[in-house]
Amino acid sequence: MSISPNIQEPSLSAVSKPGIFYGYIIILNSFLILMIMWGAQYCFGVFFKPMLKEFGISRAVLSGAYSLNLILVAVASIFSGKLSDRYGPRLVVTVCGSCLGISYLLMSQVQTVWQIYIVFGILSSISIAGSWVPLLSTIARWFVCRRGLMCGLAAAGIGVGTMLFPPLAGFLISSFGWRTSYIIIGLGLLVVVIINAQLLKRDPSQIGLSALGESDQPGDSAGGYTFKEALRTRQFWLLSAVVLVLNGCLQTVFVHIVAHATDIGVLELTAATVISVIGGVSIISKVGGGLAVDRLGNKPVTIMVTSLMCLSMIIIQFSNGLAMLYVFAAIFAFGYGGFAAMQSPYVAELFGLKDHGAILGFTMFIQGVGAFGPFIAGKIFDANSSYRLAFMILAILSFLSILLAIGINKTDRCLPMKKQ
């Protein structure tokens, strides 16, 4: 079956020739790019203890590099969203993917802590910001019908990467050392991202198409809020607060879960499989979350996601062995997967597509405050020799996020906040 950029499903578009709608090629390439870029990002927890051992630093200091990375990912996402709106995803993803590969090659050569902060904390963060927002914003432009499912399918690439890369990194580290492992991963990033980025198209109009389902819901892509107008709405800040808390939970777990597992007696190589369980289950939950968004709506899915995150943060406090960690990982992954699937569709539902990349990028900026989570958790561990207090705080915050999610009401969608 040939791939034709002029083809679309007859029931959902104006083009009726047989073939494959080019939007599905966008999904496949987004899946692969997110898989390797974020799979590599979430390997940091596997490199954590080998680097601690070599540099002789505290967990808080090394966690600080990851927190800096996440903060700058958030800041850079504002610009990556705006650049993608203006220049398209191909240029943005190509440049950022190349820089990410180079940053991993440089990580193999770091000799001091400040170099880790420069390379991983700054260069890597700016680079990885050019993946999530440009790709998910592009998918929102290609799909009106099935938007949640398609975002979930692309986001599932992160789940596959999270499932495959930490054990791979653990194997590479045990076989070749952490420095050579960074070189191998960096070369893989350069090859996969650059090749797949060349097939990205900003929107269907570039090749004479309409978005899938656009004829059914023409108003969805005909306009929407400008970036400044969105900032004046209540729902923007409520949604941003929700994703801020969820991201704080997510990043804290990815940095510290392997160390926590080894602290309670799990072998280091086996501990990395906890992240793999999260990645594996999140593949299912991202696709399922996308389907749920299409069928149930964004708000119910967001409430379910926050509830699952809260439950997982309660369970982890009682984890005393590998079995309970796997239970935690499965529940956490269902919350994480739905979180990934609902972000872009919810922004599109509330604010339209006019400045979708910029608005989605700014929500990423706000949720980046959650990047302090890993650093604070590291400080709490250094003071108490335990993560229990950190996990308890996250459980309380995630409960509050349930209330925030309930407060995002469609009835006041078009009501901006009053100027003081």
Image: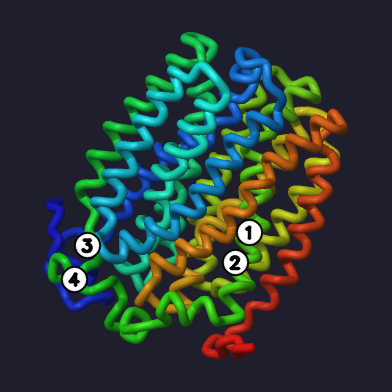
Residue type at the position of mark 1: Leu
- Check residue 244 in the rendering and tell me which mark sits there, or answer none: 1
> Which residue bears the numbered disc 2?
240
Between 43 and 14, the one lying in front of the other is 43
Please state the horizontal and vertical placement of residue 34, each as a whole percent of the image.
40, 45
The label nearer to you, 4 versus 3, is 4
Residue type at the position of mark 4: Ser
Between 312 and 216, the one lying in front of the other is 312
> Which residue bears the numbered disc 4?
205
Which one is earlier in the sequence, the residue at label 1 or at label 4? 4
Within 10 Å of the Cα at label 1, are there few (<14), some (14-19), or many (20+) other Cα atoms?
Answer: many
Within 10 Å of the Cα at label 4, are there few (<14), some (14-19), or many (20+) other Cα atoms?
Answer: few
Question: What secondary structure is marked by label 1?
Answer: helix
Real-space Cα separation, disc 4 to disc 2, in angstroms: 30 Å
At x 38%, y 21%, the residue is 184
Real-space Cα separation, disc 1 to disc 2, in angstroms: 6 Å
